[in-house]
Image (cartoon, coloured by chain):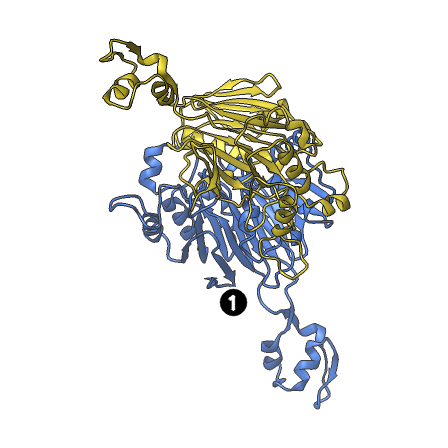
Chain colours: A blue, B yellow
Amino acid sequence: MNITFLGTSSGAPTRQRNVSATAIHPETGRGWVLVDCGEATQHQLQRTRLSPLKLKAILITHIHGDHCYGLPGLLASCQLNGRTEPLVLVGPASVWAYLQAVIKHTELRIEYPLEFVEVSSQLALELDECGVTATRLSHRVECWAYRLDERQVPTGLDTERLQREGVPPSPVYGRLQKGERVTLDDGRELNGEDYAVPAYAARSLVVGGDNDRPDLLAGACEGVHALVHEATYTEPVLQKVGPEPQHSSALRVAQFAQSQSIPALILTHFSPRYRKVPRRSGDASLEDLRSEALSQYQGDLFLAEDFDTFCIGRDGRVQRLEP
Amino acid sequence: MNITFLGTSSGAPTRQRNVSATAIHPETGRGWVLVDCGEATQHQLQRTRLSPLKLKAILITHIHGDHCYGLPGLLASCQLNGRTEPLVLVGPASVWAYLQAVIKHTELRIEYPLEFVEVSSQLALELDECGVTATRLSHRVECWAYRLDERQVPTGLDTERLQREGVPPSPVYGRLQKGERVTLDDGRELNGEDYAVPAYAARSLVVGGDNDRPDLLAGACEGVHALVHEATYTEPVLQKVGPEPQHSSALRVAQFAQSQSIPALILTHFSPRYRKVPRRSGDASLEDLRSEALSQYQGDLFLAEDFDTFCIGRDGRVQRLEP
């Protein structure tokens, strides 16, 4: 299960960071899912191996422009490039109203099946590779987090149980794994299906939208391998800006992730003031966000850059992949 | 008077070409004008010296997405970056309806003065540096070309007339140029204002939208230094595609420019099939468009690339500037 960041800036694009869009894709490169679709997401995709024609679903967290202004163009280009496969769009009702208005006013033709599913706390969307549920967040407009749970985990053999039962490794294991019935030398009859277990624990992650109350995600984050959450400001800047924008600080998100023992935390959606390489000493820096988060959180912490890809391995560990 | 192409692809962006947007800017780098605003125009601008905060007017040719999906994001970023100066938006009524719908549905706040002017054949917009008029084109939706005529041409001295009148070059010229009254040695009294002429002929150009009838621009192109026009296809491809998309071929635009003796023709809005470097021999190439145009047109021909800047010099000649 891979996560590729297509935009990590809040509000407006910078030269280094586009506005929000995050791709969740299986290692196989087959059908994938997009969370949010800021302007120029289709342009960012052209710099990756992800094909818009293999996109299965777009999940929009909320209606603000930096999370959805790339939607009409991406859908239009799918049409121009011959897409015929259905596409699912999930989000608040305002997203569908916005899209319908754009379609009407700009005479946009979309001929492939585009199905809208209004997000709610009852959402239970089953795509081939994953299931999707949603949790309401706290922001200036209706805003949601999406949890993706891996489906179709391959079947493995419960070798621990076999060894406990005195069946040592042998070609019998291979036959059992295929689900065959096997008679052992000692006369015991074993049914492979009785020893079938998932080859590894299904992977899961939560990708949040804009949110000033990370604690709302406590339930959604149970057992997840990674949380992707906005950290628009450091705590001192958040205090200065005031609560009105309803964003989180790195501090608050990190405290939450630590309290829930979430093994990996990926921060994103940084205010453009935080530069990777500050112009002058004393300028705001990404390192300010990092050190604030590290002061609270002992898990695996990452600050996302555009085009970063993270892998949740079969062992559940999150790693940043080499470009 | 400079012209910078921010997008030269039709319909969808490619890795090399963004969708339509063209900046017209004085050499001084002060207030400038944008014709069309496809998705990611604000991203393209970040790679130039043109500041959205100095943008004076946006002229939209028509409502199709590849010409206007960048508008909401650009306006939003102007707001976020503290713009207070007024901005003029010109286009068909559908553009304003589209923008108003996006503003409403996405709760976009624009607090600087944004004035909409509906385009018509009576348009006579006076900006500081140029006047703008419009000509209706032929396309699937209401579509326009904009003519920009330079204003504020500096005043020069009519030295030819002075020499005809027997006043040889001397420091007197400098005083006359300042508009002073001068008494010559022979007793004649000259008023500098009588000898004031424009330092050079005001520059002008026409930037068209999508259009299958270049001949509609005959009146608008009278005396212009350059025509910027779409050449979506070569003529054989246009014949194959059929007339339904209502685009022009390089052949037809070149024939028109030749018939009007337009001194410079800049083609743009190329179908993504035309690649600068074709993958295989026999594939469609930009050279197909160029050779088709050259077969009809003897003026200065250019095929625009993204980030190309062309200068209309004070001598009226169009040149591609070195990057």
Q: Quadrant of residue A273?
A: top left
Q: Position of residue B93 (x, y in %)?
A: 62, 22
Q: Image check: A113 left or right of A168?
A: right
Q: In front here: B99 or B12? A: B12
Mark 1 closeness class: few <14, some 14–19, many ≥20 residues within 10 Å: few
x and y percentages locating residue A309 in the rendered image: 49, 58
* Residue under pointer 1: A315
Disc 1 residue type (three-letter): Asp
**Quick one: A187 or A5, which is closer to the camera?**
A5
Give residue A13's quadrant in the image. Answer: top left
- Which secondary structure lies at badge 1? loop
Can residue A137 be seen here? The reply is no
Total numbered labels placed on residues in the image: 1
Q: Could you tell whether A247 is left or right of A37 in the image?
A: left
Is residue A74 visible in the rendered image? The answer is yes
Quadrant where the image shows the N terminus of chain B: top left
Q: Is residue A110 above or below residue A84?
A: above
Which one is in front, B204 or B13? B204
Q: Is residue A266 left or right of residue B256?
A: left
Judge whether B70 appears above or below A24 on screen. Answer: above
Residue B263 picture quarter: top right
Which sits in the foreground, A169 or A204? Answer: A204
Tell me residue A157's x, y (percent): 64, 75
What residue appears at the point 58 percent right and 77 percent down from the top-left corner? A160
Which chain is indicated by disc 1? A
On screen, residue B13 above or below B212: below
